Structures are given as C-alpha cells and as structure tokens.
Image (cartoon, grey):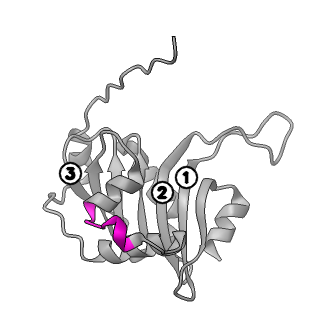
Amino acid sequence: MLLETYQTKGLLTVTLVNGQTSDAGVYAYRGDLVLKEGTLREGSTTDRRPPEALLIHSALIVENDKIKFINGLLPTLDLLPVFVEKYKADIAKDCIALIYVENIGKGMQVELEGVTYILIPFKQGLVWNELLEELYIEKSELKNQSAEDKVAIAYAAAKSYKTKSPLVTFAEAEENTIVVVKEAAVGAI
C-alpha cells in the first residue's frame, strides 16, 4: 500500500488522517507530505533532521496505489517541480491537483509530467477550510462522516471543479510569483 510505504520511508508527518474510506481500496490521508527529507544526523544511517520542505496540510486520495487527488500548501512555487519529481511515479494521469501557493498573485494552471496542477493563491487561513470553501462544500455535507470520507467528499467535489485560471508554462508561472510579506506575531506582554 502506497501510504504505508510513505509512512515507512518517513514521508508522512503531522498526520491527521490515514486510513481507508467507505469505498474498499480507496485510502485518504491528511497531514504534511515530505518533499525534501532532512539530512542524516552525524554518525546515523536512519536518524534524520526535520524535513527541509513540505507540502503543508496536504489531503490525498489513493486508489490502486496511485494518487488520484492531491491538495496542500506550497510556501513557494519552486517546490512544485520538487513535489512532481519525488512523487511522479505514484501520481495517476487523471489526478486532480489543487495546490495552494503562497507566493503567487493570481490563479494559474501548469502541466507537469502529464498532470495539470491548478495553482491557487494563498493568503492566510487553514488549507482544509479554504479547500472546502473553494469547492462549495457545506459543513452539513460533512456531518457524521468519518475523517477519511470527508477527504473523499472533497475529492468527489473536485472532480467537477472548473477554474477560469489560464493554463501557462511553468516558466510563465514563475514570472507571476510575488514577494510574501508576513506580519510579525507578538506574544503576551
């Protein structure tokens, strides 16, 4: 099973959901997906430092050991090819990919390795809540559903999702990146 393989390799972290949906052979995952592993600690062959890059708050649907749905947040657009290179063998050709990116100013679509990635600007909030809003999923639709089936509901809604964002080359997408300025957070005084 693909998710078990990822778990064994240490590619899943901050896991919220990892199990089978109501449909036999269909698995859901929510959590962070490692894009770049941390370096090995000195003298160790297994102990790694924290990951260097993540697909944050990702949601995946895996069927027949192929990723059919992927959602998550990339801090920078240049991590998209890193994701594609690392996971391309596991991504279904008909995968639905809705990726939030912090450093883009407008929505776009790019095709990499035969899969179209819908890129959505991300300002702030929770990725899961933003996805539900983007797909027009009401909280009442999720009520009394298992955590795994909630991801399956998002996947089902994503199948009919249409974007007006233009399809551009990755080079054109890189030209539309912006500088992200984060406000400093202040703790208790």
In the shown orientation, is residue 55 left or right of residue 182? Answer: right
Labelled disc at residue 14: none
What residue sits right under mark 3 in the picture?
Answer: 107
Residue 58 circle label: 2
Asked if the residue at tag 2 contacts the one at tag 1, i.e. Cβ–Cβ closer than 8 Å, the answer is: yes
* Cα–Cα gap, marks 3 and 2: 19 Å
Q: Which is nearer the N-term, disc 3 or disc 1? A: 1
Separation (CA) of disc 3 from disc 1: 23 Å
User: Crowding at label 3, few (<14), some or many (≥20) Cα neighbours within 10 Å?
Assistant: some
Mark 3 and mark 2 residues within 8 Å of each other at the beta carbon? no
Q: Secondary structure at mark 3?
A: loop
Q: Residue 30 appears at what percent x and percent y?
A: 53, 61
Magenta stretch in the rendered image: 134-141
> In x, y percent, where is residue 26?
53, 82
Which amino acid type is shown beneath numbered disc 1?
Answer: Asp
Q: Secondary structure at mark 1?
A: strand
- Residue at horizontal 57 percent and vertical 86 percent from the top: 25
Q: Would you identify the image quadrant in which residue 162 lies?
A: bottom left
User: Which quadrant of the rendered structure holds the N terminus?
Assistant: bottom right
Residue 32: mark: 1
Do the residues bearing badges 3 and 1 touch, measured as CB atoms within 8 Å?
no
Residue 6 is one of the magenta-drawn residues: no
Residue drawn at x 33%, y 53% as measured from the top left: 130
Point out the frontmost of discs 3 and 2. 2
Q: Residue at x 69, y 55 (%)?
A: 10
Is 71 left, or right, of 109 in this rendering? right
Q: How far apart in space, not on screen, are marks 1 and 2 (Cα)?
A: 6 Å
Q: Residue at x 20, y 47 (%)?
A: 172
Residue 67 visible, this angle: no
